Image (spheres, coloured by chain):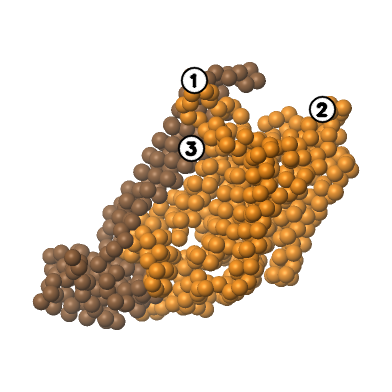
Amino acid sequence: MKMSRGLLAEFASADALVAGVVALESHGYSQLETYTPFPVPGLERRLRLGHSRLPLLVFAGGVIGAILGYGIQWYADVRAYLLNSGGRPAHAVPAFIPATFEATILGAALTGFVALLIALRLPALWHPVFEVEGFESASVDRYWLAVGADDRLFDHNGTRAALDALGPLRVVPIPEMVA
Amino acid sequence: MATVLRSKIEPVMTQTHAEVTRDIVRTLETPPRSYYLAVFGAVFLLLIGIVTFTIIIKDGLGHSGYNPPVMWSVYITTFVFWVGIGHAGTLISAILFLFRSPWRTAVYRVTEAMTVFAVMTAGLFPIIHIGRQWIFYWLLPYPNQRYLWPNFKSPLLWDVFAISTYLTVSTTFLIFGLIPDVAAVRDKVTGWRRFIYGQLSMGWQGTDNQWRHYSRAYLYLAALATPLVLSVHSVVSWDFASSIIPGWHGTIFAPYFVAGAIYSGVGMVFTLLIPLRKHLRLEHMITDYHFDNLSKLTLLTGSILFYSYSMEYFVSWYSGNTFEQTTFFLRPFGAQWWSGWTMITCNALVSQLLWFRKIRTNLTSLFVISIFINIGMWFERWVIIVSSLSNDYVPWAWGVLNPTWSDWGILAGSFGWFGMWFLLFARSFPIVAIQEVKEMIPMPRLHPDAHGGH
């Protein structure tokens, strides 16, 4: 039999998908992945995904932005080029706040965007599931559930039977990567 | 659910998920002739601007109507006008997201695109205005052989940072929201278009892990864009308020400018959205419900403007300062009295029409009002800038500014530049957020008693 990367089941509703995930997890499957057109409430708890590290990274990006923003202003106006502007002190803290604030936001937002792409493993222009015919519906109104071949319990016929028992529209294999 | 803010006009959600995708992907099909005409119109205006700008670069700013003491005029007016437009977009896409406002969903992509292109337009004006446009990068702090550094005690430099941050963050936010929607388009089209949208979607699959990080990060970006709505136009207002020119030196300026920015931005949203929705046949998605809510936002900010105008006059009278009083007397009764009255009529008075629900849900009247808002808000900045500079402390140095062909050429070019980008965007990317609209639709359920969804 041809090797495959796992099996995909197509469901007509988000409830059926969530019920399927619950059933397979109770069987002991762990390498499950879902593909949905929008975030389906309740799935992340089912799939036991860990805590996101994004908040920490975004915070760190903001702090770095603030330090850089203030640092550049301090270096420019206090160290490198002293300019008497209406008799104000060279180190004019209140005047340095607006640009520092903007730099904080910029640092946090850009860090958030880059960290997100890394977390999502994007850009990744090809994925085996894209080879499945009809998988385009995952961005329209269908809910797909994948069981990876690397799952401890994975057995082509047994897993197919387990998926069929969930009442999907159909079950298809994920093709192996074409060399 | 948000029962507190619920109006009598309710959103209508009769479509299925598949219909949402179909209707929005349809807007990306080969456009009709009218669309090309609009694009050509925009490009023509842009060409006027390019030719004018080329002449200004060759000969210098002498072509523009600068007349001491009025050395800030149409370019700075138009700069503030376009920056202001952007603020409504960020308010709708970020702040209303944090407030979980349901009417934001169908319109936020239009407003976000408007923000990016408006700020992109605004960013050109300080560069045009500085006179030696080819050394604009001297504004940036970097080690250089001139041994000079910019003066961070000047609000003009704060502005450089505020605008560039605003442009970067709002562009990031727009691209970010587009990723799953571009993936949805990728899955519907064929051939070379599928290839292009596939590349642009970066290979989005919609796995649960992706959605989880995505929703999180979207929340953060919204939270980070929110303070920009308030800070960017505050910084712009400090360009004026931190000087001692009568008519500029007011503590009310930051909130007054922010309210004006949102007011003018929602005005521009009407101007763009009303024809666009008809052209793209999205009447069933962008409904009276959305226009009613947008109108209420216009009414609120317009009334804040009304208050700010009154307060400016009151404070100038109450200050007992002759120069302040003279400046504010000359706004409605001086040489350029027409500009003062345009500002008061179009902003403070016309916005009050929106108290009537009949007007709030009548698109013809809303479109006409939105044109008044655009004109009024341009004149507000004109009045603040030019009338204040015209009449400062030394009456023998007073002067009147009359704009020239180069001022109008650049102004026309800015509308062409903005219009061209907006029109190209509207036919190339989903102008309504597919994924978020789907989230608003109650899901078909297996178990009628199961609870979930939004």
Q: What residue is at 48 percent from the left and 37 percent from the top?
A: A103
In depth, the one of A151 and B377 nearer the eye is B377
- Percent across and percent down for residue B288 are 64, 71
Distance between the alpha carbons at the discs numbered 2 and 1? 36 Å
Which callout, 2 or 1, points to the residue nearer the camera? 1
Colour for chain B in the figure:
orange
Q: What residue is at 49 percent from the left and 64 percent from the top?
A: B429
Q: Secondary structure at mark 3?
A: helix
Which callout, 3 or 1, points to the residue nearer the camera? 1
Distance between the alpha carbons at the discs numbered 3 and 1? 20 Å
Estimate how packed mark 3 is, as few (under 14), some (14 to 19) or many (20 or more) residues with alpha carbons within 10 Å: many
Q: Secondary structure at mark 1?
A: helix
Q: Is residue B294 left or right of residue B67?
A: left
Residue at the disc numbered 1: A80
Amino acid residing under circle 3: Ala
Residue at the disc numbered 3: A103
- Percent across and percent down for residue B83 are 62, 47
